[in-house]
Image (cartoon, rainbow, N blue to C red):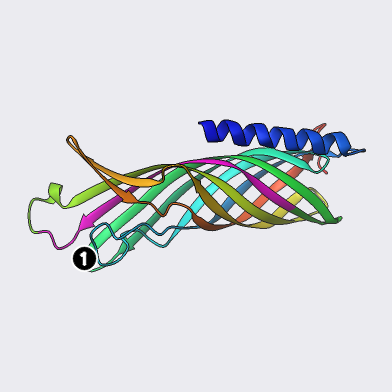
Amino acid sequence: MKQFIMIMALSLCISQAAQSQSGEKTKEVQFYLTGGMKAFSPKAFGQTSSVAPSMVPMLGGGALWQSGRIQFGAEFNYLDGKKDTDDFESILTGVNGNVIVGYAWDVSRSLKLSAQSGFTYSLHHLAVTNNTYAGPDRLNATIYHNLSYSVPVSVMVQRVGSGGLTTGLRLGYQIGVGPNEWRYIEGANTEVFTSGADGFYFQLVFGGLLGRNGNSR
């Protein structure tokens, strides 16, 4: 929570300084949907290879408000991926919520470039089934939990159509902040494993721009 407050305070100070120096401000709101992939690299958890899929599909959506060149926004994503081997099967699911702060440039009338950062809260679950276990079925599955915070750093390029419709690509990296661990809890015992929840991601972005008064750009 302390990291979150510090990041938000710093972002607010930067945005206020930038806006005070800008003259004419364009104001617009962007709503969008995303689809992409997120990289994961947890430790082996006692297996000979990583139990998690290395790339996990994610879907989501969000909104950005822009004044001048400064962007503020929020985004939500859902992740769901699988990995199958002879020894085990795993399913990784998760959700993350993002607070976004960015700076945008109009490269041309139809091309927009944005550099973005912010703060991300993530919750992931990793269910692992041991295919070699010969005992009762209810004992051959293990579920790990990961609660983590990160700072995303990304660049997004968008093409803006004449009606305000946008298509774009975002490339980024999530930098872990604070504890970043997978935990397996059984009774009074808790096993902790190093996490690889931070990593690269890319997203295709589809949406539309609206002016402050509700008209399309």
In the image, 215 versus 124, the foreground residue is: 124
Determine crowd level at label 1: few under 14, some 14-19, many 20+ residues with C-alpha closer than 10 A.
some
Q: Is residue 215 magenta?
A: no
Query: Under tag 1, what secondary structure?
Result: loop
Residue extending furthest toward the left = 135
Residue extending furthest toward the right = 23
For the stretch drawn in magenta, what is the main secondary structure?
Answer: strand
- How many marks do you count on the picture? 1
Q: Position of residue 13 (x, y in %)?
A: 73, 33
Which contiguous range is marked in magenta? 114-133
Q: Position of residue 213 (x, y in %)?
A: 82, 31
Q: Is residue 116 magenta?
A: yes
Q: Position of residue 197 (x, y in %)?
A: 43, 52
Q: Position of residue 212 (x, y in %)?
A: 81, 33
The residue drawn where x is 83% and y is 36% is 19
Q: Is residue 125 left or right of residue 47?
A: right
Q: Quadrant of the C terminus?
A: top right
Q: Is residue 105 left or right of residue 141?
A: right
The residue where tag 1 is placed is 87
Residue kind at label 1, given as amino acid type: Asp
Q: Is residue 32 left or right of residue 174?
A: right
The residue drawn where x is 68% and y is 37% is 11
Q: Is residue 204 above or below residue 15?
A: below
The residue drawn where x is 33% and y is 62% is 83
The residue drawn where x is 29% and y is 66% is 49
